[in-house]
Amino acid sequence: MPIHAQLLRHAAERPDKPAVVIDGRSLSYGELYVRAKAICRFIQELPRLSRRTLDLPGVGKLVALSLGNHIGFAEYFIAATALPNACAVIDPMMPPERIERIIERLAPDVIIVDDDAGPTAEIARRLGISIVTAGPEPFDLAAAENDLPDDAEGIFLIGFTSGTTAEPKAYFRSREQWRRSLDRGRTVFELEDAPSTLCPGALAHGLALYALVEALDAGGTFHSVRKWDPAAVARILASEEIERLVAVPTHIAGIARAWADKPALTSLRDVLTAGAKLDLNGVEAMRRLFPRARIREYYGASEIGFMTVSTLVGGAVDFPIDRVGQAYPGVEISVRGPDENDVGTDAPGTIFVRSDLIADGYLWGDDGQAFRVTEAGATVGDLGELDENGMLRVIGRAGGMMISGGNNVYPAEVESALKACPGVEEAVVFGLPDAYYGQRIVAVVSGEAKDAKMLADHCARQLARFKIPRQFHHIASWPMTSSGKISRGQVEAAVISGDGLVLRLSA
């Protein structure tokens, strides 16, 4: 990991300061650094797996982490990313068959788990991979003599993203890319005074993993929870007087509901969201819940890193709610047509980025449809438009476009309109086959709004007629992915099957 020098400094200057706190269990900076050193030595002494076929130049041991939000995640991640090692972070909540395919391809030298009897451990044993269970200490703390190597070169992280398919794609990151990103982020997000940070998301996913690393880089205390519980998260925010919250909008909405009858959380100075666009209702709820906080959001992708950042509340100038902001420092954004020529301002097209934060590529899974790099820059296929002030509006993913009655319709635009409707908390829009329209637009909403005519009338005031959903459903509780996002596939399947998860609304 590209922050070992910073960790050494924090451990020397503030050894007793809590570095990581998860469900009340904590590791100080002194403990974290000593334990990471011991683990690093332990990893180096493990035998190397001879059948690795992946081309990973300069990588010594390849360590797979399948820990979930375990208190030991940080120490194992730090050890596993010390030069020349590299770490693959695997979400233990993925289906076992998907985990098995990943481990077969990776052939890591060792896999770290939190349950020796769990599915990941069983898969590793079957494939002949060494297993270490976090918690017990297979390493000798007294044997950790030398400092962790601090070198900014080479691959250190392998992550997984589904892209345009459900099968995980394996991308890889270099230490140099994250070092540049962390250096800029310390200024952009004003982390110089090391604020306490809480991120309730899964550490196996980019948002929470990066939040952990940037907190440790700055010398702050990082808080999280083993299992998502909005009431528990709200209690931590209040009792620990957390200064900074990093979360996806669905997590923040859950916190707001769980804390609705409690006093406002006034210790928060910053709330940063990503993963989905904030809507006006969400921003207003956050104003009430965090009255002293600056509300910011960023737009990015695992393969590209930060693309834009905006301040919706509390900045010198509050950004428009329908935009995701202006380019992140060091990033150049353009919107281009099918020929990859720049379409200019206020015209839709594919979003391209030039940046020194872009991932090196995929180890596997490159279908040419998601992340790709051309002479125009890098893109993950998102569609958007830029205005004359360089403000970016994201329309949606090209693969998600619906064609209804011969017209192109993007789900994100319809969802944004619905989420501005009184009584709607969240919305998911998709197309289903239709003999007349080709695809009929279907909307699923949560909240108090349960009248299809009222929803359609609201859409009619904001959207062209052909973009208005022809079918509305209500859902009481959204199925979620482990990263805290709505599982759109499960929602669509529930509408198709009529399994009772959703209720068809009538006018």
Image (cartoon, rainbow, N blue to C red):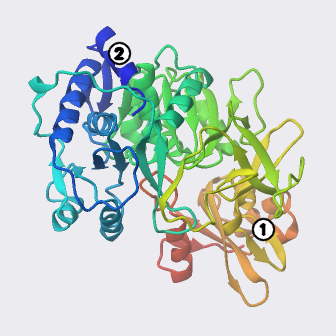
Task: Say which element carries label 2.
Answer: helix
Q: Residue 289, can we see it?
A: no
Query: Which quadrant would residue 4 be assigned to in this image?
Result: top left
Please, what is the three-letter code of the amino acid marked with disc 2?
His
The percent position of residue 495, horizontal first and vertical second, equals 56, 76
Q: Which residue matches tag 2?
A: 10
Kindly report the distance in space between the C-alpha atoms of the residues bearing marks 1 and 2. Answer: 51 Å
Q: Residue at x 71, y 23 (%)?
A: 315
Looking at this view, is 465 or 330 the one in front? 330
Q: Which mark is residue 103?
A: none
Question: In percent of the image, x 37 and y 46: which residue is there?
Answer: 228
Of all residues, the one furthest to the bottom in this rendering is 435
Q: Amino acid at mark 1?
A: Val
Q: Secondary structure at mark 1?
A: strand
Question: Relative to residue 365, is residue 442 drawn left or right?
Answer: right
Q: Are marks 1 and 2 in contact (CB under 8 Å)?
A: no
Q: Position of residue 314 (x, y in %)?
A: 68, 24
Please state if 124 lies on the left or on the right of 507 as rendered: left
Q: Position of residue 332 (x, y in %)?
A: 74, 39
Image quarter of the N terminus: top left
Visible residue check, residue 386: yes
User: Would you place residue 153 above or below residue 384 in this image?
Assistant: above
User: Considering depth in this image, is 241 or 303 the residue closer to the camera?
Assistant: 303
Query: Is 257 rendered above or below residue 427?
Result: above
In depth, the one of 152 and 371 nearer the eye is 152
Mark 1 and mark 2 lie on one chain; the one further toward the N terminus is 2
User: Is the C terminus in the top left, top right, bottom left or bottom right quadrant?
Assistant: bottom right
Establish if 135 lies above or below 490.
above
Residue at screen point 36% across, 62% down: 94
Mark 1 highlights which residue?
409
Q: Total label count?
A: 2
Which marked residue is nearer to the observer: mark 1 or mark 2? 2
